[in-house]
């Protein structure tokens, strides 16, 4: 079953404008499937296969001759030197758009190569697992059980396209960790014990929605903070973890400086935390953090796919007053508090109220409480309660 992706229209537009387009994102998010579905006339080659990567590295000109444009090149991180030869091919036909689509799963190392080699010739798009909006086109978006299941199952397309896989969700995620994450770990740094790294994964997943504390995470897995920090950089580079930085305007010590930690997909985090079914997650003490992770993740997709000029932050002062999400678009701020409840009240907008006091009401164009309501309403005249599942409609 094919699930329509929001990004397809943007890809078509960019293919008419740029000689090359780079799509970065976690493994198994559907990058290749989307490109092959959207551009069926393109050739395709995957560097995930050792023989292809070796050919691309050892004789790149011959490799590109054998795989002519227009071409989809999958997992470019296995042959990064090929980018220089792609640049030469692009420059020989600079006026021709849509020559290459390139995908990669390790955004930090990949982006360093792309920035250096293909500057001015390429558009870069971050990719993610399915948004709830994409799932809602196939199911009843108002179905409470569907919504809760999405938090637990996550947005990896294969789990939704193949019903048998959703039943075997635990085996699918364990295979995902073993086959993909551990292989990426080996490529990015030398981890002596992959079992220790999986313990580290679980310790990180247990902290979704929390301010990052490397000492605590390192202590949980018996590793020094420097090692924990290095390992976390692998999760960020592999697009598994999102770090949301604090918002401040030169207020120095009054504002926290540590980022907040989220998983790019709540389903992977739920698996790592050991939630074996939807009900155990929904009834757990961690549901508020997972809900916050979900809402932030949907706005990350909104930014990356529709409004790349936007920036996302969180805010917290010395007294621990906090706003879960600050959105800056065109110089206008939107404050979003995230609550796992149907009827947020006055206490739920304390953080927004403090944020307004600090920066001024004119600086905050919109204020929302993303919750489980089915109808919008005012919360103490400070913010508007909205359905957190429908943030795209804003």
Image: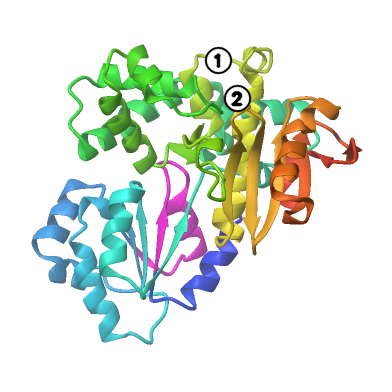
Residue under the point 74% across and 44% down = 356
| Image location of residue 278, percent across then percent down | 64, 18
Q: Nearer the viewer, residue 349 or 1?
A: 349
> In which quadrant will I find the N terminus?
top right
| Residue at disc 1, secondary structure | loop
The residues bearing labels 2 and 1 have C-alpha atoms spaced at a distance of: 8 Å
- In the picture, residue 214 is in which quadrant? top left
- Tell me which segment is drawn in magenta: 21-43
Q: Nearer the viewer, residue 133 or 224?
A: 224
Q: Residues within 10 Å of mark 2 (few under 14, many from 20)?
A: many
Q: Is residue 284 left or right of residue 32?
A: right
Q: Mark 2 touching mark 1, by CB under 8 A?
A: yes
- In the picture, residue 59 is in which quadrant? bottom left
- From what the image shows, is residue 209 above or below residue 25? above
Residue under the point 51% across and 46% down = 128
Q: Is residue 321 left or right of residue 153?
A: right
Q: Which mark is residue 152?
A: 2
Q: Which mark is residue 275?
A: 1
Q: Is residue 212 visible?
A: yes
| Image location of residue 164, percent across then percent down | 54, 27
- From what the image shows, is residue 132 above or below residue 193? below
- From what the image shows, is residue 190 above or below residue 283? below
């Amino acid at each position: 079953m094919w699930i329509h992706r929001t990004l397809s229209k943007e890809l078509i537009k960019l293919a008419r404008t740029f000689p090359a387009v780079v799509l970065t994102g976690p493994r198994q998010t559907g990058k290749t499937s989307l490109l092959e579905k959207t551009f069926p006339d393109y050739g395709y080659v995957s560097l995930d296969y050792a023989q292809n990567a070796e050919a691309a590295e050892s004789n790149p000109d011959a490799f590109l001759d054998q795989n002519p444009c227009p071409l989809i090149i999958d997992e470019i991180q296995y042959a990064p030197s090929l980018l220089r030869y792609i640049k030469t091919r692009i420059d020989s036909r600079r006026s021709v758009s849509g020559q290459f689509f390139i995908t990669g799963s390790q955004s930090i190392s990949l982006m360093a190569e792309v920035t250096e080699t293909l500057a001015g010739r390429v558009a870069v798009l971050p990719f993610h697992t399915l948004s709830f909006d994409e799932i809602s086109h196939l199911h009843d978006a108002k179905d409470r059980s569907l919504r809760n299941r999405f938090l637990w199952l996550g947005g990896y397309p294969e789990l939704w396209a193949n019903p048998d896989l959703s039943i075997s969700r635990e085996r699918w995620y364990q295979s995902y960790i073993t086959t993909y994450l551990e292989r990426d770990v080996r490529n990015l740094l030398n981890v002596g014990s992959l079992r220790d790294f999986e313990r580290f994964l679980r310790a990180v997943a247990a902290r979704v929605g929390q301010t990052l504390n490397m000492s605590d995470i390192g202590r949980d897995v018996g590793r020094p903070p420097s090692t924990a920090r290095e390992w976390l950089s692998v999760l960020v580079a592999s697009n598994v973890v999102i770090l949301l930085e604090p918002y401040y305007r030169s207020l120095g010590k009054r504002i926290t400086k540590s980022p907040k930690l989220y998983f790019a997909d709540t389903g992977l985090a739920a698996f790592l935390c050991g939630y074996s079914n939807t009900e155990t997650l929904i009834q757990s003490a961690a549901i508020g953090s997972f809900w916050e992770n979900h809402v932030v993740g949907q706005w990350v997709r909104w930014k990356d796919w529709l409004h790349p000029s936007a920036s996302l932050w969180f805010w917290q002062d010395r007294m621990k007053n906090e706003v879960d999400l600050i959105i800056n678009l065109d110089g206008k701020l939107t404050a979003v508090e995230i609550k796992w409840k149907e009827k947020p009240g006055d206490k739920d907008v304390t953080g927004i109220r403090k944020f307004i006091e600090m920066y001024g009401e004119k600086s905050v164009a919109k204020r929302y409480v993303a919750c489980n309501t089915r109808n919008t309403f005012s919360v103490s005249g400070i913010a508007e309660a909205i359905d957190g599942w429908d943030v795209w409609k804003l």
